[in-house]
């Protein structure tokens, strides 16, 4: 079950399924990890970065690892 959980209870307080998330700077570093995390939560992720090559590699990595 995906989503952000309350610390006191293991109940979801937000689900990213059927949501679109735009990650600026998503081709490396923190942005890359944020994009991967949202993908694991079943969000549709848009990676926006000036480094198109690395952005495409992140997309391939997410698809290959099954984070979509």
Image (cartoon, grey):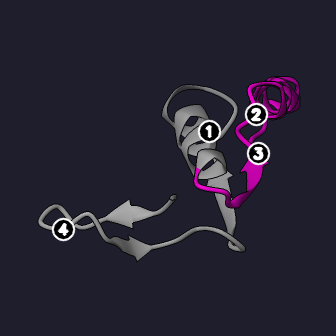
Q: Badge 2 is on which residue? A: 66
Alpha carbon distance from label 1 to label 2: 10 Å
Q: Position of residue 42 (x, y in %)?
A: 67, 57
Q: Position of residue 45 (x, y in %)?
A: 73, 55
Density class for disc 2 (Cα within 10 Å; few <14, some 14-19, many ≥20) is few
Alpha carbon distance from label 2 to label 4: 28 Å
Q: Are marks 2 and 3 in contact (CB under 8 Å)?
A: yes
Question: Of callouts 4 and 1, which one flags the residue occurring earlier in the amino acid sequence?
Answer: 4
Determine whether 58 is above or below 14 in the image: above
Q: Residue 54 sits in which quadrant?
A: top right
Density class for disc 3 (Cα within 10 Å; few <14, some 14-19, many ≥20) is some
Q: Residue at x 44, y 74 (%)?
A: 14
Q: Which residues are magenta?
A: 41-68
SS at mark 2?
loop
Q: Badge 3 is on which residue? A: 68
Alpha carbon distance from label 2 to label 3: 5 Å
SS at mark 1?
helix
């Amino acid at each position: 079950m995906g989503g952000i959980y309350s610390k006191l209870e293991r109940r979801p307080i937000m689900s990213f399924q059927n949501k679109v998330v735009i990650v600026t700077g998503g081709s490396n570093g923190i942005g890359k990890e944020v994009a991967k995390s949202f993908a694991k939560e079943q969000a549709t992720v848009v990676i926006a970065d000036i480094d198109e090559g690395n952005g495409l590699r992140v997309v391939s990595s997410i698809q290959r690892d099954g984070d979509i």
